[in-house]
Image (cartoon, rainbow, N blue to C red):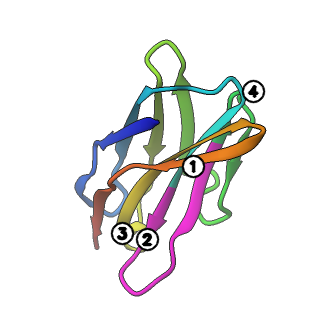
């Protein structure tokens, strides 16, 4: 089992910045990916950014150039630096951990609210 605890959400004005953190604990997998997803009211959950154990990153087109995902393996933590925030970035942001050993093991955090005011 992997437990994920997100923090760093809050209310910010458009153009501002926030940094989300996701601390992982429990059993880890050598081959893994961590990522951030978000879900706005009335919309499906969507990918924001992911980073693999090999440090490959992937971003949604809507956040490229504004958001940066990174990880600190010593702290078992993944971060999402969000700059130039827009009202449409408002959503609950979820951390996800996927580990691969013969099959994919999939874990989610409880979510943290990000609200961007115009």
Query: Distance of mark 1 from mark 4, alpha carbons?
Result: 18 Å
Q: Secondary structure at mark 3?
A: loop
Q: Which of pointers 2 and 3 lies earlier in the amino acid sequence?
A: 2
Q: Which of pointers 4 and 2 lies earlier in the amino acid sequence?
A: 2
Q: Are marks 1 and 3 in contact (CB under 8 Å)?
A: no
Residue drawn at x 35%, y 81% as measured from the top left: 41
Q: Nearer the viewer, mark 2 or mark 1?
A: 1
Q: Secondary structure at mark 2?
A: strand
Give the residue pinned by disc 4: 54
Spot occupied by residue 35 in the image (x, y as percentages of width and height): 56, 46
Q: Secondary structure at mark 1?
A: strand
Spot occupied by residue 49 in the image (x, y as percentages of width and height): 60, 51
Spot occupied by residue 72 in the image (x, y as percentages of width and height): 51, 20
Mark carried by residue 106: 1
Query: Distance of mark 2 from mark 3, alpha carbons?
Result: 9 Å
Q: Which residues are magenta?
A: 37-50
Q: Secondary structure at mark 4?
A: loop
Give the residue pinned by disc 3: 90
Q: Residues within 10 Å of mark 3 (few under 14, many from 20)?
A: many
Q: Which of pointers 3 and 4 lies earlier in the amino acid sequence?
A: 4
């Amino acid at each position: 089992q992997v437990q994920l605890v997100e923090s760093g959400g809050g209310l910010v004005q458009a153009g501002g910045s926030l940094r989300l953190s996701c601390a992982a604990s429990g059993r880890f997998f050598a081959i893994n990916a961590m990522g951030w997803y978000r879900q706005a009211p009335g919309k499906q959950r969507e990918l924001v950014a992911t980073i693999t154990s090999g440090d490959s990153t992937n971003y949604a087109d809507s956040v490229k150039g504004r958001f940066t995902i990174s990880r600190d393996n010593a702290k078992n933590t993944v971060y999402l630096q969000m700059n130039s925030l827009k009202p449409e970035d408002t959503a609950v942001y979820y951390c996800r951990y996927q580990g691969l050993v013969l099959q994919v093991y999939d874990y989610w955090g409880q979510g943290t609210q990000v609200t961007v005011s115009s």
